[in-house]
């Protein structure tokens, strides 16, 4: 009966833990391994202009939908300007306004994004565009081109591709040459293409974005073609007709509006600067969860002050030590002094390093034990005797530190990190076992403690595990489930198999 | 390794984990532990149940009473000092005689002389909790020192052998006699180096011995053959052990009995977590016998009936026990 409850409880704990773990890992994107870095791009737009005599209004197109990228944060820097965000047809527009100012003005708009291939943001389905009003002789040229391309295509995508191929031919025909004569800049070039597509009743628009490259002081928005095939928006390279977006293309705004409009200023200069840096994946997951309003993150360890976090990253490993301890005791069957003494010793091994830790521990216990035997002759009562052992342990730690420092062995100083009360109790316990059961049992117990401590240290020192448990503390429930299950383990201990060997009947 | 584990399971050997979870935790309610952990209480309960125990000379429960020692033992030349909450025979001093010239000089079972002052120090250590679990304050018992039964003189070195009976739900299912050796310092405790010898439940005859988990045929100090001794008053011993259930209420129990030259079998103490070495001493696993008791269990049977049933149910299986002697 109890056994069934134990299994149910263990299964329940594991389930809760696994569910939280998977949610945090898959949905919130918490990193499984430490030092997982995600590239983060910072794009800075600076607008410079000379202020005119009257009031000034600056409108800047800013990104709204950015396929392939997610926004971490955005902010603007301007002195004395009022700031506003407006939704316009092409997306969003940032607006700065000031009543009176003078001299050269600079306004910054900064946006921090990171790559997320899963982010597929597309706009809503647009209506069919009205036929554009075009004057002769361009009107005829457009009609000829549309009829020509329509004959050689099957649907929107192939129509667009064919049109782009014709336009980009090294020696285009007369109609195209006529059409493209006025398209001086790449933006005008794409604008003209959208006009032709509109004449064919295909919803199309120009998008402009920035190709992200590290340490770019000045980069210009690159125009691209976006065509709706009745189902979704598709992207085309206006210069080759190839479908898709350029690599590392951050879509900035849509439509034919200029990037920036300044009312009341002159000599406007706009430039983009791009910088790449790497942010801890954890930080990104956190901010993302914050944006999505997940409660789990509010209660994560990362909300604690940094110093407390450092303490917890160590403390959270103690359950792992306890797990090792339970395993060593009930499955292996190793004798050790003090139930969890080896776990505490293992904790101090973190500071002293393994070899030195083992040496210092043996030294301390050995010296303490010999002095404890001298104390035995004085026939002291229990508590005063324990007090005396504790004082001796502290003095020994002092001596070891000073002597090793004089010898130039700086590791010896870390002896101070051993839990002195625990060591004193171990010495006392060991000396009693020594007297009553003989040196063999005492030394076996002491070595057993050391072995368990070493294994606990190795388990607790696994960096990936430490990271995993710190980011996913719910995994401790799994440790709890395992310990509970081991609590009902009725099989033999490994050491019993040798102990009862004579009964195995071979 | 796994093959050995499989064979052990087939042989019905009980392991520590199974003993703890399936028997001790299930059959021994914790609130009954004081009845066996406190030797003073055990003695009282056993007396009430009409069982024979070593006579209590006195109790020292405070530091201030330590000086009463001389008065308590004034009429006795031999006595035993033990902590009421001691475990594993720790903290026990056996005084067998006094110096002829001075009455405040005592001789222990191992032949060492101890002054009264030293005994007082030992008692004050007991009272301050040196030998009790968790270092809690304790009381020291001073009681009758069991006289050696000559039948064991060949197979024990100093000290007095005692008989351990495992009682499962009131049925004495396995027994052994623990013989002190030189290494055990005259103490009848297996982990201190005493020899354990299995006893045939049905006849009371000793089987082979076990020393430090190995099977031995001869006593390491006297060289005498351990097997083939008949324990006197075996019926009475089994009945006393079976009565352990009524006295303590514990379903998985170890009862320790000594045989006194003059007073016969005396209940020395009882143990709620008896060790598993008894299986090696008997060359038999406990599981089979536990299973058998579960089959024949009768809640209304009295201790005498239960002891009688066990004598017919659990004869030593010499066919498998004997060939193993050579391997030890």
Image (cartoon, coloured by chain):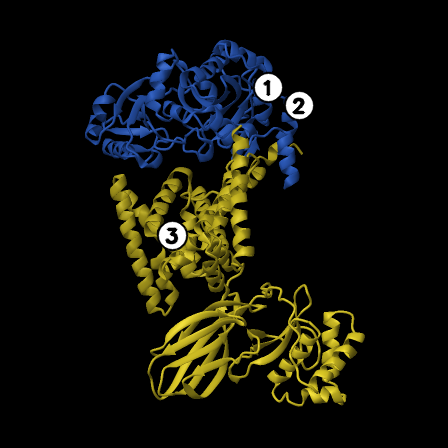
State yes or no: discs 2 and 3 in contact (Cβ < 8 Å): no
Q: Quadrant of the C terminus of chain A?
A: top right
| Residue B193 seen in this snapshot | no
* 1 vs 2, front mark: 1
State yes or no: discs 1 and 3 in contact (Cβ < 8 Å): no
Percent x, y for residue B146?
Answer: 37, 20
Which chain's colour is blue? B
Badge 1 marks a residue whose secondary structure is helix
Colour used to depict chain A in the structure image: yellow
Quarter assignment of residue B96: top left
How much space separates mark 2 and mark 3, taking CA atoms?
50 Å
- Residue at image position (34%, 36%) is B134
Percent x, y for residue A56?
Answer: 38, 82
Residue located beneath label 2 in the image: B319
How much space separates mark 1 and mark 3, taking CA atoms?
50 Å
How much space separates mark 1 and mark 2, taking CA atoms?
20 Å
Q: Is residue A185 above or below residue B244?
A: below
Badge 3 marks a residue whose secondary structure is helix
Chain assignment, label 2: B
Chain assignment, label 1: B
| Residue B167 seen in this snapshot | yes
Q: Residues within 10 Å of mark 1 (few under 14, many from 20)?
A: some
Chain assignment, label 3: A
* Pick the front one: B328 or B36: B36
Q: Residues within 10 Å of mark 2 (few under 14, many from 20)?
A: few
Residue located beneath label 3 in the image: A366
Residue located beneath label 1 in the image: B292
State yes or no: discs 1 and 2 in contact (Cβ < 8 Å): no
Give the residue furthest to the right.
A151
* Pick the front one: A465 or B175: A465
Please state if A485 lies on the left or on the right of A127 as rendered.
left
């Amino acid at each position: 009966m109890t056994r069934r409850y134990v299994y149910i409880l263990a299964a329940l704990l594991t389930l809760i833990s696994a569910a939280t773990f998977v949610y945090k890992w898959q949905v919130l994107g918490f990193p499984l391994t430490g030092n997982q870095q995600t590239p983060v791009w910072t794009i800075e737009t600076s607008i410079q202009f000379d202020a005119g005599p009257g009031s000034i209004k600056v409108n800047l197109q800013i990104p709204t939908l950015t396929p392939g990228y997610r926004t971490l944060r955005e902010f603007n820097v301007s002195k004395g300007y009022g700031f506003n965000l407006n939704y316009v047809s092409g997306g969003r527009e940032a607006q700065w306004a000031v009543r009176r100012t003078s001299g050269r003005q600079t306004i910054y708009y900064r946006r921090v994004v990171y790559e997320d291939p899963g982010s597929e943001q597309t706009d809503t389905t647009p209506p069919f565009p009205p036929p554009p009003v075009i004057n002769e002789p361009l009107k005829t040229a457009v009609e000829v081109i549309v009829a020509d391309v329509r004959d050689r295509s099957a649907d929107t995508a192939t129509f667009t591709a064919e049109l782009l191929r014709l336009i980009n031919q090294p020696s285009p025909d007369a109609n195209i040459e006529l059409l493209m004569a006025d398209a001086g800049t790449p933006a005008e070039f794409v604008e003209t293409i959208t006009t032709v597509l509109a004449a064919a009743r295909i919803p199309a628009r120009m998008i402009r974005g920035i190709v992200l490259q590290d340490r770019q002081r000045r980069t210009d928005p690159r125009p691209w073609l976006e065509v709706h095939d009745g189902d979704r928006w598709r992207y085309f390279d206006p210069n080759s007709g190839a479908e898709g977006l350029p690599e590392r293309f951050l879509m900035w705004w849509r439509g034919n509006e200029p990037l920036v409009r300044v009312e009341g200023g002159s000599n406007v200069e706009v430039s983009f600067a791009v910088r790449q840096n790497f942010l801890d994946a954890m930080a990104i997951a956190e901010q993302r969860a914050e944006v999505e309003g997940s409660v789990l993150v509010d209660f994560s360890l990362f909300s604690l002050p940094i110093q407390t976090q450092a303490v917890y990253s160590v403390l959270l490993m103690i359950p792992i030590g306890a797990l090792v301890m339970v395993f060593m005791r009930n499955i292996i069957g190793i004798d050790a002094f003090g139930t969890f003494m080896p776990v505490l010793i293992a904790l101090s091994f973190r500071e002293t390093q393994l070899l030195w830790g083992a040496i210092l521990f043996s030294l301390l216990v050995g010296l303490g034990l010999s002095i404890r035997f001298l104390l035995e002759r004085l026939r002291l009562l229990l508590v005063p005797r324990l007090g005396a052992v504790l004082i001796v342990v502290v003095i020994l730690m002092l001596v070891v530190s000073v002597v090793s420092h004089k010898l130039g062995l700086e590791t010896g100083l870390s002896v101070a990190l051993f839990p002195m009360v625990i060591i004193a109790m171990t010495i006392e316990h060991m000396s009693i076992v020594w007297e009553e059961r003989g040196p063999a049992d005492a030394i076996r117990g002491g070595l057993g403690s050391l072995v368990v401590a070493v294994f606990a240290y190795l388990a607790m020192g696994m960096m990936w595990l430490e990271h995993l448990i710190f980011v996913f503390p719910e995994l401790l429930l799994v440790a709890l489930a395992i310990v509970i299950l081991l609590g009902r383990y009725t099989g033999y201990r490994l050491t019993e198999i040798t102990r009862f060997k004579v009964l195995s009947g071979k | 390794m796994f093959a050995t584990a499989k064979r052990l399971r087939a042989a019905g050997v009980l392991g520590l984990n199974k003993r703890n979870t399936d028997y001790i935790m299930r059959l021994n309610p914790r609130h009954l532990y004081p009845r066996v952990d406190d030797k003073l209480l055990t003695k009282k309960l056993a007396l009430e149940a009409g069982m024979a125990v070593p006579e209590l000379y006195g109790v020292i429960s405070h530091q201030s009473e330590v000086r009463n020692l001389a008065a308590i033992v004034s009429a006795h030349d031999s006595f035993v000092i033990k902590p009421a909450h001691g475990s594993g025979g720790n903290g026990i001093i056996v005084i067998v005689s006094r110096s002829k010239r001075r009455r405040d000089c005592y001789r222990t079972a191992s032949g060492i002389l101890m002054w009264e002052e030293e005994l007082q120090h030992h008692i004050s250590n007991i009272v301050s909790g040196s030998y009790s679990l968790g270092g809690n304050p304790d009381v020291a018992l001073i009681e009758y020192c069991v006289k050696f039964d000559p039948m064991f003189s060949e197979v024990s070195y100093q000290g007095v052998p005692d008989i351990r009976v495992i009682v499962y739900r009131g049925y004495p299912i396995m027994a052994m006699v623990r013989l002190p050796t030189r290494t055990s310092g005259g103490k009848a405790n297996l982990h201190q180096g005493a020899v354990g010898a299995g006893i045939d439940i049905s006849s009371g005859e000793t089987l082979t011995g076990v020393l430090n988990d190995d099977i031995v045929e001869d006593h390491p100090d006297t060289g005498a053959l351990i097997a083939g001794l008949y324990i006197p008053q075996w019926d009475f011993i089994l009945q006393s052990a079976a009565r352990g259930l009524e006295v303590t209420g514990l379903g998985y129990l170890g009862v320790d009995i000594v045989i006194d030259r003059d007073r016969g079998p005396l209940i020395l103490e009882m143990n709620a977590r008896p060790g598993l070495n008894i299986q090696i001493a008997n060359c038999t696993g406990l599981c089979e016998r536990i299973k058998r008791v579960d089959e024949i269990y009768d809640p209304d049977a009295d201790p005498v009936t239960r002891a009688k049933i066990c004598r017919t149910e659990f004869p030593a299986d010499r066919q498998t026990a004997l060939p193993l002697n050579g391997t030890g």
